[in-house]
Image (spheres, rainbow, N blue to C red):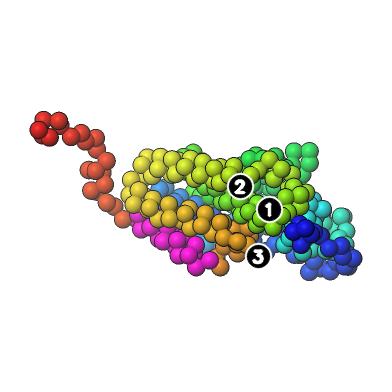
Amino acid sequence: MKSDALAVVPTRPRKASIRSYLALARFDHATKHVFIIPGLILAYALREPPLDNAVVTIILGFASAIAVASANYVINEWLDREFDAHHPSKQARVAVRSSLSPFLVYCEYAAFAASGLLLASQLGTSFFWTSVAFLLSGLIYNVPPVRSKDLPYVDVVSESVNNPIRLTLGWTMIDPSTLPPSSLILAYWTAGAFLMGAKRLSEYRDISGAGGHEILHRYRRSFRYYTAESLTVSCLLYAMISAFFIAAFLVKYRLEYIVAMPFIAVLFSSYLWLALLRNSIAQRPERMFRSKRLVASLCLAVFALFVTSFVDMPFLYDLSRESFVPVDKLK
């Protein structure tokens, strides 16, 4: 049977080393913190706060975010070890292949969580409580009895909440006196849902295409309720909702941003294209920068947002006024 090719090959757990425990923190996933950067840019462009000690604040902010994210990764990999054993690539993870001490794993989690929150406490109340939300999101997503990752669609929404959290972390590094607009938070959240939905679509297509439906269901319970069609439709829904909130934000806060909208649409399309490829790196977002097409799309979108943040375009305001074509002129 085809599914035999995906079956887990039992191996004797190897003795864990210090490197094994550090691998749980997934420092290679730090690239995901790129989603903090738009928060930095937009907070400065829209609020124009003083930038006293901004460099130190940003360095401490990123260090805090990485530490909290590492705490979430530690608990994720530890609690998922029995499920990851059924995944074609995740079965190679340290928690699956090594004999780890539960006491040391939880100590590592506590150390990363405490250090992340300690750093966050130096950056103001808003940044600190956003970091607390970041830590709690990992517990809700991974820890029973809630363990939202086992619930269809709720898994996508709860995992993608990390996107607006990262946005807010970036924003509060620059302007700790305010929070991002709700339209921007919702746009970021639903855009993250699109990314996570595309990731699941890619996993579903690859594993089920190799005859591994049963393995897919054992790997993640939520996949019992998904189909390729439902995941594709959900990606379209998330993208459309995100585009709506992006447009609402653009028009309300700076009309010049509308020029960046086509580049954002290309970025969405590039990621979906990537997710539809066999063995796509969309399944491993930390490697997304290996795609030249995706990197080019991202750079163009970021550049467009940067330019439109600081270059005024008065003609757009003339175009945005109400305008109706008189019927008499058509005769």
The quarter of the picture where the N terminus appears is bottom right
Residue at the spot 54% in from the left edge and 43% down from the top edge: 233
- Residue located beneath label 3 in the image: 28
Callout 1 touching callout 2 (CB < 8 Å): yes
Mark 3 to mark 1: distance in Å? 28 Å
Please state the horizontal and vertical placement of residue 168, each as a whole percent of the image. Answer: 54, 47
Compared to 147, does 195 lie above or below? below
Please state the horizontal and vertical placement of residue 124, each as a whole percent of the image. Answer: 58, 48
Instruction: Mark yes or no: residue 183 visible.
Output: yes
> Which amino acid does the dot numbered 3 rest on?
Asp
User: The residue tagged with tag 2: helix, strand or loop?
Assistant: helix
Q: Is residue 222 left or right of residue 316?
A: right
Q: Is residue 301 magenta?
A: yes
Q: Which one is in front in this view, the residue at disc 3 or the one at disc 1?
A: 1
- Residue located beneath label 1 in the image: 208
Circle number at residue 86:
none
Q: Is residue 39 magenta?
A: no
